[in-house]
Image (cartoon, helix red, strand yellow):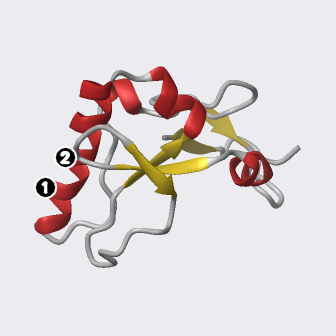
């Protein structure tokens, strides 16, 4: 099963700055600075303080004009099966023919 399909099947919820689940992701009234969204399973595994911290971080950075804001370390969603590992380097052959001795180095983030 593809990673995008797995992502779509997860139940994503909106997190308020008070640390509570506010409803389904994508239903925020503030379109210029939306709330933080997390999979429901991840949101339920975090404490109210951790949820509040990641939501506040998103809102603060959003006020500065940023649209993509990294989660706090506790709220980072990690892929469990066959996902990419952050910070590892590996050698990739690429899509087409590769000349002898010439390999692309790909950084998986």
Image x and y of residue 78, in percent:
55, 30
In this picture, residue 25 sits left or right of residue 75 = right
In this picture, residue 33 sits left or right of residue 108 = left
Give me the residue at 72% from left, 54% from top.
8
Label pair 2/1, CB-CB below 8 angstroms: yes
In this picture, residue 86 sits left or right of residue 34 = right
**Badge 1 element:** helix
Position above or below: 91 against 7: above
Position above or below: 7 against 35: above
Give me the residue at 82% from left, 61% from top.
96
User: Residue 1 falls in which quadrant of the image?
Assistant: top right
Image x and y of residue 6, in percent:
76, 45
User: Residue 24 falls in which quadrant of the image?
Assistant: bottom right
Q: Label 2 vs label 1: CA separation?
A: 6 Å
Dot 2 crowding, Cα within 10 Å, few <14, some 14–19, many 20+: some
Mark seen at residue 60? 1
Give me the residue at 26% from left, 70% from top.
33
User: Residue 83 falls in which quadrant of the image?
Assistant: top right
Give me the residue at 75% from left, 29% from top.
82
Residue in the foreground of this view, choosing between 66 and 37: 37
Image x and y of residue 87, in percent:
45, 30
Mark seen at residue 16? none
Image x and y of residue 89, in percent:
53, 30
In this picture, residue 87 sits left or right of residue 11 = left
The residue singled out by tag 2 in the image is: 56
């Amino acid at each position: 099963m593809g990673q995008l399909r797995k992502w779509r099947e997860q139940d994503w919820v909106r997190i308020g700055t008070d640390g509570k689940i506010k409803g389904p992701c994508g239903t925020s009234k503030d379109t210029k600075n939306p709330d933080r969204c997390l999979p429901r399973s991840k949101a339920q595994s975090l404490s109210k303080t951790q949820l509040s911290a990641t939501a506040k971080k998103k809102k603060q950075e959003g006020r500065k004009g940023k649209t993509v804001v990294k989660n706090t370390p506790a709220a980072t969603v990690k892929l469990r099966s066959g996902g990419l590992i952050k910070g590892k380097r590996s050698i990739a052959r690429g899509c087409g023919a590769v000349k002898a001795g010439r390999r692309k180095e790909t950084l998986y983030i």
